[in-house]
Image (tube, rainbow, N blue to C red):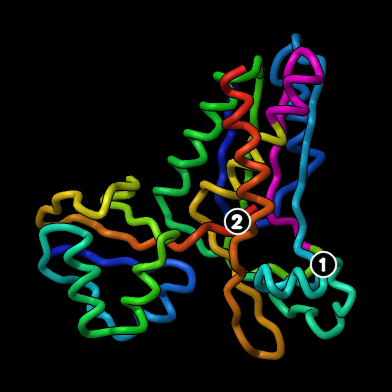
Amino acid sequence: MINLLFFGRLGDFAKQVPSTMAASTPAEIRELLAADFPDLGRELNQPQVLVSVNKMIVGWDQPLFDGSEVAFLPPVTGG
Amino acid sequence: MTDRIRIQQQDFDLAEEYQLLRQSDSAVGAVVTFSGLVRDFELGSDEDRKADPEGLSSTKNSIDLLSLQHYPGMTESLLETIVEQANQRWNLIATTVIHRVGDLAPMEQIVLVGVASQHRADAFEAAQFLMDYLKTQATFWKSVRRNGEQQWIESKDSDQQAAARWDSSADE
């Protein structure tokens, strides 16, 4: 299973999302989520949203393995 | 090079951090520190900022609380990378980056960037670079509470532009 994390405003759209799911790429997770949660799907498809796997920014077609931690990251606003 | 990177809920003491930088090496000839504070207002979107760039209607926008979220583990390693890049570009003796997380009230300190070097140009430029990169690359997210309602802060084009100037100067 893949562990899912949603940061910033994405967290507001992901309150009903399970914390784990089975998938082979972040793009597939995005697709599956968009089918069940259209509002979240729209947010995840924004071009500024980045995805990380095990705390490294990666492309959407990065292969996932059991236990991978996938985080969806909206534009950062620290400092 | 002495690098000090901290993500913490508690406040920091600017004077203490300055002393650590000052005393990091007898070759230190310049120390630059920047500290960022919570304003009592925060404009949400680029549209809001266009409508009221100076925040003149700050009574309308004044906030009760600023909350900072981060991605534990990832934020630390991104800050380390940013500090490493600064060390590669400038001749630095010591660098401190402290970023607070959690709930902060107006006028509280959010962030400290401090740089010690032999000469002032390195310290000035590196401090600006560190802040510009921290603002656009480190995984922190701000939200504000205003009249009991939480609102996420949107990223600013001006911050992206400030960070982009360092990309172009890399070719010089």
Q: Would residue B125 be counted in the magenta stretch?
A: yes
Q: Residue at x 19, y 71 (%)?
A: A20
Q: Which chain is disc 2 placed on?
A: A
- The dot on residue A78 is 2
| Horizontal side, residue A33 vs residue B64: left or right | left
Q: Position of residue A12 (x, y in %)?
A: 44, 80
In magenta stretch: residue B112: yes
Kindly identify which residue carries mark 1.
B53
Vertical comparison of B139 with B119: above or below: below
**Which image quarter holds the N terminus of chain B?**
top right
Quarter containing the C terminus of chain B = top right
Q: Secondary structure at mark 1?
A: loop
On screen, residue B56 versus residue B132, left or right, reads right
Can you give x and y, in whole percent of width and height, for residue A11 in the image?
Answer: 41, 75
Horizontal and vertical percent position of residue B81 = 47, 33
Left or right of residue B114, residue A50 in this image: left
Q: In percent of the image, x 35 and y 63: which residue is there?
A: A72
Q: Quadrant of residue B57?
A: bottom right
Residue at 30% across / 84% down in the picture? Answer: A38
Answer with the quarter of the image where residue B18 lies.
top right
In the rendered structure, are the residues bearing label 2 and label 1 in contact, judged by CB atoms less than 8 Å apart? no
Q: Quadrant of residue B166?
A: top right
Q: Determine the chain carrying the residue at label 1.
A: B
Instruction: Identify which amino acid the numbered label 1 is placed on.
Output: Pro
B104 or B152, which is in the foreground? B152
Crowd band around label 2 with a 10 angstrom C-alpha radius: few (<14), some (14–19), many (20+): many
Q: Residue furthest top?
A: B27
Range covered by the magenta-colored residues: B108-126
